[in-house]
Image (spheres, coloured by chain):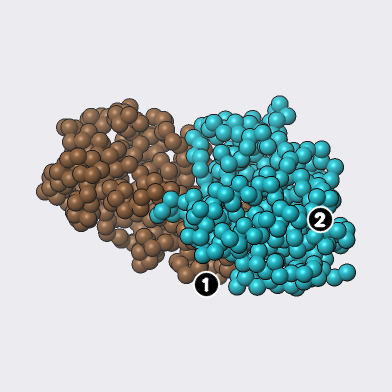
Chain colours: A cyan, B brown
Amino acid sequence: MAVYTEVADEELAAFVSRFGIGELRAAKGIAEGVENSNYLIHTTEGLFILTLYEKRVIEADLPFFIGLMEHLAGKGIVCPRPVKDAGGQALGRLAGRPAAIVTFLDGMSVRRPSVGHCRALGEALARLHQGGADFAGRRRNALSVKGWRPLFEAAAPRADGVAPGLARQIEAALAALERDWPQDLPMGNIHADLFPDNVFFIGKDVSGVIDFYFACTDALAYDLAVCLNAWCFEPDSSFNMTKGQALLSGYRRLRPLTPAEAQALPLLARGAALRFLLTRLVDWLDVPAGALVRPKDPIEYLRKLRFHARVASAAEYGFVT
Amino acid sequence: MAVYTEVADEELAAFVSRFGIGELRAAKGIAEGVENSNYLIHTTEGLFILTLYEKRVIEADLPFFIGLMEHLAGKGIVCPRPVKDAGGQALGRLAGRPAAIVTFLDGMSVRRPSVGHCRALGEALARLHQGGADFAGRRRNALSVKGWRPLFEAAAPRADGVAPGLARQIEAALAALERDWPQDLPMGNIHADLFPDNVFFIGKDVSGVIDFYFACTDALAYDLAVCLNAWCFEPDSSFNMTKGQALLSGYRRLRPLTPAEAQALPLLARGAALRFLLTRLVDWLDVPAGALVRPKDPIEYLRKLRFHARVASAAEYGFVT
């Protein structure tokens, strides 16, 4: 939830007018995405989203994100379609920041995903992977295994203040993952942050996948591992195997997993848990006392990491061979 | 800018379904209003605003606010129209809070109002006053002269930490206002918070007036004084008499001022300046160190108060007899 940049009305109107999407009627800063400033734009042609990219997003990565969305939308995948200006450019500048306009997607994100939502998500994820396979862009996953130790080192000195023994537990998990991280799984363009916030449903169907600003080129099965963590745990931190099975079978209906992918799933799930544990921990330690915006709890992901450490095979996630 | 209350998707859908405004397609928390949580709602019938009333709004006042909007909208005045549920009720409960849905108004608020905007605002304000004249509801202005001393007393001990000599200046202004505040000006239902944020324009025309949650029954000319402060000063704190004249003549074209109103204008403008100086000062002192949301600068209103103290007659605001 964030609107970091406020844009003057004249500037906004001038920017929008370049995109051939009708006349600007209204613009509302919306609480969507934590990294960027987003405005919902109402024009005589309909609804759009205007995003101003804030400092956490590296400008050189934007053509990848925007190109991927455009590529996927062109294949009928329900993701925002970047709108191009008269010069054919989707990326512009507004209020001193890179900015883009994308189509608005109807639908609501679900707070408590059901088994049916998990199955629909699995199918949507497989479509995303299949659709992105022939996208020429490449972007290294800066938040994969090589990126974790620097995050850990930044957080380690104060980690035990968040939870006793946390630094030691992270160190042990990290060392194992650095040693065992798989190198030869099928690769592709992945979303890498497919939390329930970033998926819209209308009824039972996925109507939108948004927020491609962590998308990168990495093991496809890693995306599944992120989703297992984000969608299949209950609020009491228990893993719901029925949801896991629904997610996996939804995915596999469209894209079967290789034996190596299935075997790597527990390891990938530990990695995905550690990745969010670390970034949340850094954010948690970074917040000034008394701030009104409370970051997400890192310990939720420590519990998930611990769960995966006890998992012997993908069967425990509901993977049925 | 605020979304204080997050509402679960199922709860939101169930609430919306009672209002006969079609099927819910999307809901976005928007950065509008500082007192309440607002969602922009997209349904199969169009756009609406859902407001959850937070603790600063007194629940017993809501029927007045909602009734006034309904009354004004019924007269064709461009303000949000509360939507009624099947039982004829506009006010419901959602996520443990009072909540209402109103129609969405297109238009953009202006950061830097032009002379033309000030004239259009004056006309819109006069229409609001005329339209509200036969509304039966009454609400005392809790933030008029009798409400100022308690605010001052709350802020006084730390006021000089915000600006040296501030407490003394407020005390002097307050004592004079308490002594001289007019009691017999024409009364009516006023907006009382008609800042540029709360007025939408499409081109030169006012397309919407929102945020009636300070509306009350008070001197009509006090509303003009609030607008003189909020619309006719330049960013360097200078008063723009051309804008003042446009505002006043726009208003007077539809509703002439009585001689007593014209004469009282400098006093009312000092009062309106003190009211916002005090509430901003209290908010300023109330914010925890390091908070991300920075309250509005009270000193802007100290400068306005000082300006009005030197004004001898309404002619200096551009009032032409």
State yes or no: discs 2 and 1 in contact (Cβ < 8 Å).
no
Chain letter behind tag 1:
B
In the rendered structure, the answer to whether residue B25 lies left or right of residue B194 reads right
**The image quarter in which residue B53 lies:** bottom left
Judged from the image, the secondary structure of the residue bearing numbered disc 2 is helix
Image vertical order of residue A104 relative to residue B9, above or below: above
Q: How many marks?
A: 2
Q: Where does residue A18 sit, x and y in percent of width and height?
A: 64, 30
Q: Nearer the viewer, mark 2 or mark 1?
A: 2
Disc 2 versus disc 1: distance between alpha carbons? 46 Å
Q: Where does residue A252 sit, x and y in percent of width and height?
A: 85, 61
In this view, the residue in front, A196 or B10, is: A196
Residue B39 in view: no
Q: Where does residue A47 sit, x and y in percent of width and height?
A: 64, 45
* Type of the residue with mark 1: Gly
In this view, the residue in front, B319 or B61, is: B61
In this view, the residue in front, A93 or B198, is: A93
Number of the label disc, if any, that sits on residue A126: 2
Chain letter behind tag 2:
A
* Type of the residue with mark 2: Ala
Number of the label disc, if any, that sits on residue B87: 1
Q: Residue at x 31, y 48 (%)?
A: B284
For the residue carrying disc 2, how many other residues have a C-alpha within 10 Å: few (<14), some (14-19), or many (20+)?
A: many
Q: Residue at x 56, y 62 (%)?
A: A166
Q: Where does residue A113 sit, x and y in percent of width and height?
A: 67, 66
In the rendered structure, the answer to whether residue B169 lies left or right of residue A244 reads left
Quadrant containing the C terminus of chain B is top left
Q: Residue at x 85, y 70 (%)?
A: A320
In the rendered structure, the answer to whether residue B241 lies left or right of residue B29 reads left
